[in-house]
Image (cartoon, helix red, strand yellow):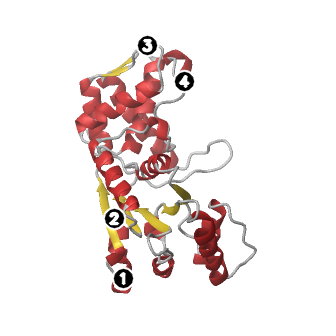
């Protein structure tokens, strides 16, 4: 709707994890360095913890892009699979077809591929599991055993678990202590501070290549940070609504009043969903989004 008005090549504040728009804050950069070190050191398990919307998934995509010449990857987006299904997903991602259904046979297929195909090619495999706090304890323990696949010199299979703080609580349980002890790299991803929020907004605007400058005033940035708590996903939601407001008001400067209207618009839209208003076909009910502090 507003792409032509601003001259964007694509929307700058989409919610999808697009590495081309990724803003590397000092905290994200440090997390990336830790994970690269862990991978190059051959650590079996690494952990990236952060609140919903802090950029864990996008960071993992950036990591995969940087290491694509050295590694093969499996990205598991559905942590509610049982162990057999998880093995199937990993094999499929690695380009291995297996007719088997039992976990032992699937694991043997994976071992064969890693030892005879991946290893001789001078590569290792990294399995990235998103929302890993939802993995069952049984599956987590089986992954620990699976991580023992290695040659005399290096591990052939590594795991990066992305999750919320509940994952730390799960790993602290007694029956998962062996896995917990194997996690050599742990990093907690913080939300952005106010200055970083401004840099984030400007970075994504520039990545969208507007035909002429689009700016958020200093007060607007402060309001967006206060509303979002520095969580990139919430910043994107509000910033996108602000651009719509700018388009409607025919201005390329997003100021305090436009942000205030956009916040009201977001909250009003949510309230209509909670009330169960019809969208033309079905009735919509939704829990309240994790909005930041009130103005």
> Which residue appears at 35% of the width and 27% of the height?
202
Please give the label number shown on residue 178: 1
In contact (CB < 8 Å): disc 3 and disc 4 = no
Question: In 3D space, how far apart are the residues under numbered discs 3 and 2 (Cα atoms)?
Answer: 41 Å
| In the depicted structure, whether residue 216 falls above or below residue 232 | above
Nearer to us: label 2 or label 1: 1
As helix, strand or loop, the secondary structure at mark 1 comes to helix
> Which residue appears at 39% of the width and 54% of the height?
52
Residue 9 falls in which quadrant of the image? top right
Per the image, the residue denoted by label 4 is 9
Q: Which residue appears farthest toward the right when viewing the image?
A: 99
Per the image, the residue denoted by label 3 is 212
Q: Earlier in the sequence, mark 2 or mark 4?
A: 4
Q: Earlier in the sequence, mark 3 or mark 2?
A: 2
Question: In 3D space, how far apart are the residues under numbered discs 2 and 4 (Cα atoms)?
Answer: 36 Å
| In the depicted structure, whether residue 174 falls above or below residue 214 | below
Per the image, the residue denoted by label 2 is 165
Residue 66, x across and y down, in percent: 46, 46
Q: Residues within 10 Å of mark 1 (few under 14, many from 20)?
A: some
């Amino acid at each position: 709707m507003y792409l032509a008005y601003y001259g964007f090549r694509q929307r700058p504040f989409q919610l999808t994890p697009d590495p081309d728009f990724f803003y590397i804050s000092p905290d994200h950069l440090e997390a990336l360095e830790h994970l690269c070190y862990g991978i190059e050191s051959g650590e079996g398990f690494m952990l990236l913890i952060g609140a919903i919307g802090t950029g864990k998934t996008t960071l993992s995509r950036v990591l995969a892009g940087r290491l694509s010449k050295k590694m093969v990857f499996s990205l598991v987006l559905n942590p509610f699979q049982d162990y057999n299904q998880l093995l199937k997903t990993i094999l499929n991602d690695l380009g291995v077809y297996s007719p088997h259904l039992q976990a032992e046979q699937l694991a043997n297929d994976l071992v064969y591929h890693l030892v005879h195909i991946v290893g001789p090619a001078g590569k290792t495999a990294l399995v990235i599991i998103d929302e890993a706090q939802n993995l069952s304890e049984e599956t987590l323990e089986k992954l620990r055993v699976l991580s023992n696949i290695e040659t005399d010199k290096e591990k052939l299979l590594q795991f990066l678990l992305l999750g919320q703080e509940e994952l730390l609580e799960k790993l602290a349980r007694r029956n998962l202590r062996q896995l917990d002890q194997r996690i050599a790299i742990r990093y907690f991803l913080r939300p952005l501070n106010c200055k970083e929020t401004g840099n984030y907004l400007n970075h994504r605007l520039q990545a969208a290549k507007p035909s002429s400058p689009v700016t958020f005033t200093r007060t607007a940035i402060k309001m967006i940070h206060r509303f979002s708590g520095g969580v990139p996903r919430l910043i994107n939601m509000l910033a996108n609504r602000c651009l719509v407001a700018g388009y409607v008001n025919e201005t390329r400067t997003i100021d305090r009043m436009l942000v205030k209207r956009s916040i009201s618009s977001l909250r009003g839209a949510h309230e209509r969903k909670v009330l169960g208003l019809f969208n033309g076909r079905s009735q919509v009910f939704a829990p309240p989004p994790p909005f930041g502090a009130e103005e």
